Image (spheres, rainbow, N blue to C red):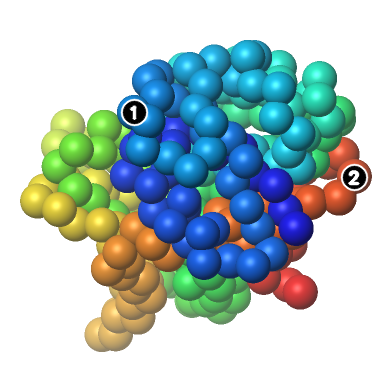
Amino acid sequence: MTRIIMSGCNGYMGRVVTDIVAADEDARIVAGIDLEDKGDKDYPVFTNIADCGVEADVVIDFSAPGALDSLLAYCTEKQVAAVFCTTGYTQEQMEQIRAAGAKTAVMKSANMSLGINMLLKLVQEAAKLLAPAGFDMEIVEKHHNRKVDAPSGTALALADSLNEALDNQYEYIYDRSGRRQSRDKKEIGISAVRGGNIVGEHEVIFAGFDEVIEFRHTAYSRGVFAKGAVQAAKYLTGKPAGIYDMADVISL
């Protein structure tokens, strides 16, 4: 039985994770963390994780980047694993997460869905074949109008996968409005669309001469991310200190 602390339990994703875990015989949420206790949970809610004295195996975080310091302090001190699903971290915060892996099991994935993590592998193979053949690579991501970070963490992860497959020779271009020049061969364009209630759509385009190949993933519900987070939490339970990724989970 995996005992979970749900950070951001009052948010949309926190509520979805709560519902998924309630139907899972192998997991249980033992405490929640949020700015206020709304009194509608079957588990105790704390406004500060430092005040949480409930025994747990792993923290699932769907809150905000500002909560990172307190979560890392708690997890490293208590030797509790952590699944960080929040987006919008700074580079410095990403370094903090990686450093925490020396003390406890940590997973940070740009996207928790099974489909996206399979797509990360597929586009690498495509890039190795198509980029040397002269195909240009572009990424277009679409999200709801409340998403504040752009491009999405998933779009950047896709770009990193492409670039890694090509010995990191490519530059990321986010805006061409001020570039009065033709496209450079060693660039990956990344475009962000914000509107309506789009859950998440990511498209990787390989554009060649007289042919175009597209890889696309569409999330119709944020439940796919919650399911992945719970799967990751169960995977991390009992694991030694280190940095893990969803690729470890789906390789089972």
Name the residue tied to disc 2: 240
Q: Position of residue 114 (x, y in %)?
A: 53, 69
Q: Position of residue 17 (x, y in %)?
A: 46, 52
Q: Which mark is residue 23?
A: none
- Residue at 48% x, 72% y is 115
Residue 30 appears left or right of 130: right
Q: Amino acid at mark 2?
A: Pro
Q: Which mark is residue 38?
A: 1
Residue 64 in view: no
Quadrant housing the C terminus: bottom right
Above or below 235: residue 103: above
Of helix, strand and loop, which one carries label 2? Answer: loop
The crowd level at tag 2 (other Cα within 10 Å; few <14, some 14-19, many 20+) is some
Nearer the observer, 210 or 116: 116
- Residue at 64% x, 67% y is 25
Above or below 183: residue 211: below
- Residue at 71% x, 22% y is 53
Nearer the observer, 54 or 108: 54
Instruction: Report, in whole angstroms, how far the alpha carbon at label 1 lies from the one at label 2.
Output: 35 Å
Of helix, strand and loop, which one carries label 1? Answer: loop
Residue 200 in view: yes
Residue 179 appears left or right of 56: left
Q: Position of residue 193 (x, y in %)?
A: 18, 49
Q: Earlier in the sequence, mark 1 or mark 2?
A: 1
Toward the left, the furthest residue is 196
The crowd level at tag 1 (other Cα within 10 Å; few <14, some 14-19, many 20+) is few
Above or below 22: residue 252: below
Q: Amino acid at mark 1?
A: Lys
Q: Nearer the viewer, mark 1 or mark 2?
A: 1
